[in-house]
Image (cartoon, grey):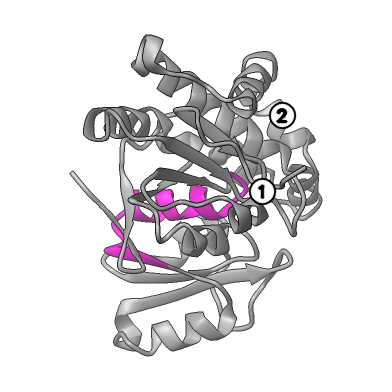
Amino acid sequence: MSARIDLRHRVHVLGKKEELATTPVEGRIVIVLDILFATTTMVTALAHGATEVIPVADEDAARRASRQHPASQVVLAGELYAETLPGFAHPAPLSLLQHGIDGKTVVYSTTNGTVAMTLSAAAEHSYCGALLNARRLAEHVVARHPDRPILIVCSGSGDNFNLEDFYGAGYFVERLAELLGPRADLSDAAITARSLYRHARAPEVLHDCRVGRMMAARGLSAEVEFACRFDAFPVIPELRSGSLALIA
């Protein structure tokens, strides 16, 4: 049986970024999710005054990108396998806000979420999503792209499925289906994600998942709670020419 994803439906969900290898994004609207924490952090940074966030694939790419900006105007942030990179700011949202990002460019490298963003760059439009901005982003996608197929990409973790991303995808599906009405046409993966969202509860579901438990063990439960602030920031971050910035 072919590994290619069936994209005939209007709204579809990918369970991990590795599925992008067999899933064309050209001509599609892509929403990338990494709830704990990459996309949550990028949404938060832009909602709190960062001029742009540059998501990159790895540490070397981050250091190269940072050299394109005056040192006083750039913040390097990121992790690899949940360990903050040497000389980088902590990648979780509250920690990055405490570091200070207002008026600055954030160059951001993570194990999964920023990789997923770079892999989605060829999409017709690629957006950064989180529970924090789901409602506003869903409204924008339906209003601006009323007839385009929508692909929600869960970043996952090292070729593994992540519960928190699929839960977040379910919330996006709920909002999109509400807005699209009879035009929704959900794939089986989208229906399953929505069912998870309807039957699970935040913040418990994020605390119970593997990454949530790991964050708690590191004293970062407040970061997990923060990621559960549904629709707190009505912002729309779009990836254009390798940079995420807010659009009207």
Callout 2 secondary element: helix
User: How packed is label 2: few (under 14 Cα within 10 Å), some, or many (20 or more)?
Assistant: some
Callout 1 secondary element: loop
Closer to us: 42 or 216: 42
| Circle number at residue 16 | 1
Quarter where residue 80 is shown: bottom right
30 in relation to 42, above or below: above
For badge 1, the amino acid type reads Lys
Residue 183: x and y, percent? 38, 16
Closer to us: 166 or 192: 192
For badge 2, the amino acid type reads Val
Residue occupying the far left of the picture? 248
Question: On the picture, is 227 further left or further right than 31?
Answer: right
Q: Is residue 228 visible?
A: no
| Circle number at residue 25 | none
What's drawn in magenta, residue-wise? 35-54
**Which residue is rendered at x = 63% and y = 42% of the image?**
224
Residue 119: x and y, percent? 51, 62
**Which residue is rendered at x = 57% and y = 69% of the image?**
78
